[in-house]
Image (cartoon, rainbow, N blue to C red):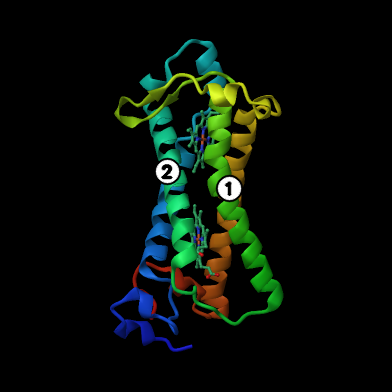
Amino acid sequence: MSHNCSKFHGNFMNQQHTSRYDFPSRVFHWVTAVVVTIAFVLGPGGFGRLMREGIDPATRSDIVWHESLGILVFALTVLRLIWVAFRPAAPQVQMASWMQLTSKLVHVALWMLLLALPATAVLALGSKAHPLTLLGGVRVDQLPLIANASIAKLADWGDVHQFLGDAIMWIVGLHAAAAIYHHLILKDGVLSAMLPYKWFR
Ligand code: HEM
Ligand code: HEM
């Protein structure tokens, strides 16, 4: 695979031999990574207790930011999946088949978590009749479609959401460690393919 063929291609649709992801894929990846990490840090602990004490979640900036960034992750993921269907082929790096398979599994797990986190959050709020409170004063007090659906009673969706929130960070840790291993040990260009700039080559 050529190291510099994409350097001469201003148009990202024209990268049949590129060694990097197209520009929108790289932007989606890193914006999502930053937004997910901030949302995780702001994850509201003791949410159930606050609700029992009658505290309005709209008065808590950590909750309002957490929910807004989480909805942003959902929007970015839907747009990104649409882009994945139309974008130029992702760079193919030669590697052992077990490694190819593991990387596919980790990516599928990450995609599913990016969708399951907002879904379980909305189920958690809807099933307990807690308001969804976003930046800009946006507020949805009831989600009757969810409250009345049988799925609402299947689980404590707040617990499931919290578990998945922890799980995505563990899997991201594994994913980032793999990227660094590819870069430092295998030196096969996998990390450079996703970096926003040509830092390494
Ligand atoms: C990238 C997406 C998200 C991540 C990584 C994430 C992560 C987390 C984590 C780790 C917690 C538990 C915090 C703790 O107990 O210390 C949590 C709780 C919570 N999150 Fe999210 N979240 C995401 C998206 C959302 C969205 C989109 C909403 C709302 C629409 C939301 C609403 C909540 C609520 C209400 C709780 C409290 C749940 C409860 O204890 O019943 N989250 N989140
Ligand atoms: C919340 C954080 C992150 C999430 C949710 C995430 C998710 C993903 C997803 C879904 C893909 C497939 C992308 C596509 O096909 O367009 C991907 C690829 C990739 N990610 Fe991440 N990522 C995160 C953080 C990181 C970090 C911290 C690193 C590096 C240290 C990293 C390095 C890479 C690389 C190198 C690829 C390309 C892998 C390949 O072509 O086989 N990611 N990531």
Taking 73 as reference, is 180 above or below it?
A: below
Front in this rendered view, residue 195 or 145: 145
- Residue 4 visible in the shown view: no
Disc 1 residue type (three-letter)? Leu
Q: Quick one: 159 or 184, which is closer to the camera?
A: 159
- Residue under pointer 1: 113
Residue in the picture at 49% in, 78% down: 189
Q: Is residue 151 above or below residue 178?
A: above
Q: Quadrant of residue 110?
A: bottom right
Q: How crowded is mark 2: few (under 14 residues within 10 Å), some or many (20 or more)?
A: some
Label 2 sits on residue: 38
Establish whether ligand 2 lies closer than 8 Å to the Cβ of label 1: yes
Residue 67 appears left or right of 149? left
Q: Position of residue 83 (x, y in %)?
A: 44, 61
At 42% from the left edge and 86% from the top edge, which residue is drawn?
3
- Can residue 130 be spotted in the picture? yes
- For the point 52% across and 75% down, the residue is 184
Q: Earlier in the sequence, mark 2 or mark 1?
A: 2
The numbered dot on residue 165 is none
Q: In which quarter of the image is residue 13?
A: bottom left
